[in-house]
Image (cartoon, rainbow, N blue to C red):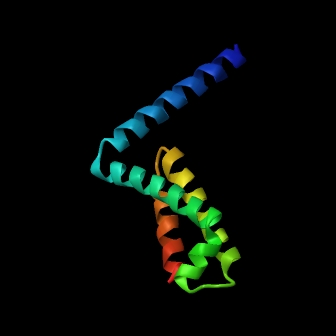
């Protein structure tokens, strides 16, 4: 009985999260967050895979490892934004990271 209860509770929790997630994406803010999540993934992938040409273009020769670290950070934030039922903390984390870059 306990196992059945936990399985049933897990299913209802996932259904609730899915409903909250789909409702959130139907708002303007949710749509923008979703797009920002994909942008973060794309930017992070570029920073990881093309750190040398990117460093050269930005005038940051010798800082390729820093650019790759930024790429990892962007990918983590993008995954968090896209997979979380409430992406707000991930969005604020991204804002804080961008502020540190300045």
* On screen, residue 32 above or below 25: below
Q: How many marks?
A: 0
Q: Is residue 76 above or below residue 85?
A: below
Residue 32 percent location from the top left of the image: 35, 54
Closer to the camera in the image, 48 or 36: 48
Residue located at (50% from left, 66% from top): 94
Residue 68, quarter of picture: bottom right
**Left or right placement of residue 10 versus residue 88 in this view:** right
Q: Farthest left residue?
A: 28
Q: Nearer the viewer, residue 74 or 88?
A: 74
Whole-percent x, y for residue 54 in the image: 57, 74
Q: Position of residue 71 (x, y in %)?
A: 61, 65
Name which residue lies at 49% across and 78% down.
Answer: 99
Q: Please name the residue shown 41% across and 32% down the image.
A: 19
Q: Is residue 32 left or right of residue 74?
A: left
Quarter in which the N terminus is drawn: top right
Q: Residue at x 36, y 49 (%)?
A: 30
In the depicted view, which residue is nearer to us: 32 or 45? 45
Question: From what the image shows, is residue 44 above or below residue 79?
Answer: below
Q: In this image, 17 relative to 5: left or right?
A: left
Please state the horizontal and vertical placement of residue 95, each as a whole percent of the image.
47, 70
């Amino acid at each position: 009985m306990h196992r059945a209860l936990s399985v049933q509770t897990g299913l209802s929790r996932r259904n609730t999260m899915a409903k909250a997630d789909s409702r959130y994406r139907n708002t303007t803010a949710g749509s923008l967050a979703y797009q920002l999540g994909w942008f973060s993934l794309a930017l992070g992938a570029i920073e990881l895979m093309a750190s040398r040409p990117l460093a050269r273009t930005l005038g940051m020769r010798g800082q390729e490892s820093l650019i790759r670290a930024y790429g990892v950070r962007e990918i983590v934030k993008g995954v968090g934004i896209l997979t979380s039922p409430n992406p707000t903390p991930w969005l604020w984390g991204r804002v804080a990271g961008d502020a540190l870059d300045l």
